[in-house]
Amino acid sequence: MTVTIYSLAAIALFVLGLYGLWWQPHLLRKLVSLNIASAGAFLLMVALAYRGGDPDPVPHALVLTGIVISVSATAFAVVLAARRYRETGSVELDEPEARS
Amino acid sequence: MNRVAFRCLHGLVIAVLAGLAYLLARAVLALDPDGRGLSDTVTSAMPESGVLHPLTAVLLNFRGYDTLLEIAVLLVAVLAVWSLEPPAAPCSRVLQEPAHRNPVLLVGLGVMVPMIAMTAGYFVWVGAYRPGGAFQGGALLGAIGVMLASTGVLPPSIRRTIRLRLATTIGFAVFLLVALLTSLWSGTLLTYPKAWAGLIILAIETALALSIGVSLALLFMAAADRATVHREDAP
């Protein structure tokens, strides 16, 4: 039961993060959304590892690896976004259509 | 794009994502609630791992390949960030601010930094038989870097000395060396001789913790430095 609640919450987080990544034009918002989505993925793996009594260490190890990867990707993305701001003066991806 | 089309697109995005959420939930609920995954396999292989904690055994022994690639990704991230941002002038603007001359802050740092460093060492050591290991220790070392950078003790545009580069690379280098030696010795990548497994894992973890800590701190400093420039440049 607990595993189900955590898994469904993780899926909700993941999809919310994807929504932000897809729809928010601002790069920083995309980045925060990406991190929310990856938090959802990590939560799902940790929750599913807990099925059947004692936790399965393999997904835990994968999540630990994934956290470090996601931190380094985030730092790289922040620097890329800052560079884009300096080069073009814009912190949004090129969207030809007007929003709203 | 006009407003109606925009609304339609927005609705479509939400519908697709809701469908995705439904499919994922179906997939998760269809899993065997008592599925044990690989935990029995790991438990039965534990005597060969050289450590007593299953998580460390998976990270550094059974799935050592993942960890090797992970430290490579971390190194590539630092290299990528450094390539994007050439080193700034050695004397950075943060050093010019007197904030870090606050005596309470400095005494606090003097107490906390050694304690965090000691805790990081303990985490690396304890990983052999309890939750802990290179990543937890490395994260704490990275936290020291973040503290020193955000209090202005370390300039964000840190000079890329050879020592700094060595500290960033040593985790990957040691791991790669072990991979090379084991593949020459036993013919398979990262298959440790059983008697040496514990020692090899401790050596890799120590080097990994140092590199992870330095890399995380460097990534933070690069990002923070850019953010500062960003703020000051803003109209």
Image: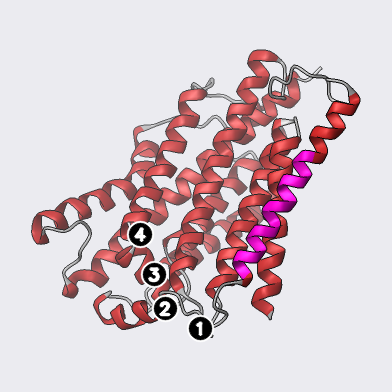
Q: Is residue B83 magenta?
A: no
Q: Nearer the viewer, mark 1 or mark 3?
A: 1
The residue under the point 38% across, 64% down is: B59
Q: Looking at the image, is mark 4 or mark 2 earlier in the sequence?
A: 2
The residue under the point 72% across, 48% down is: B17
Q: Nearer the viewer, mark 2 or mark 3?
A: 2
Q: Is residue B15 magenta?
A: yes
Front-most of residues A29 and B147? A29
Q: Are marks 3 and 4 in contact (CB under 8 Å)?
A: no
Q: Which residue is mark 1?
A: A54
Front-most of residues B229 and B183? B183
Q: Which residues are magenta?
A: B12-28
Same chain for labels 3 and 4? Say yes or no. Answer: yes
Q: Left or right: where does residue A69 sit relative to residue B95?
A: left
Query: Quick one: SS at disc 3?
Result: helix
Query: Quick one: SS at disc 2?
Result: helix
Q: Which residue is mark 3?
A: B56
Q: Are marks 1 and 2 in contact (CB under 8 Å)?
A: yes
Query: Quick one: SS at disc 1?
Result: loop
> Callout 3: few (<14), some (14-19), or many (20+) C-alpha neighbours within 10 Å?
many
Q: Position of residue B223 (x, y in %)?
A: 60, 34
> Callout 4: few (<14), some (14-19), or many (20+) C-alpha neighbours within 10 Å?
many
- Marked residue chain, label 1: A
Amino acid residing under circle 4: Thr
Q: Which mark is residue B39?
A: 2
**B21, above or below B220, in the image:** below
Q: Position of residue B184 (x, y in %)?
A: 10, 54
Q: Nearer the viewer, mark 4 or mark 2?
A: 2
Q: Nearer the viewer, mark 1 or mark 4?
A: 1
Q: Which mark is residue B206?
A: 4
> Callout 2: few (<14), some (14-19), or many (20+) C-alpha neighbours within 10 Å?
some
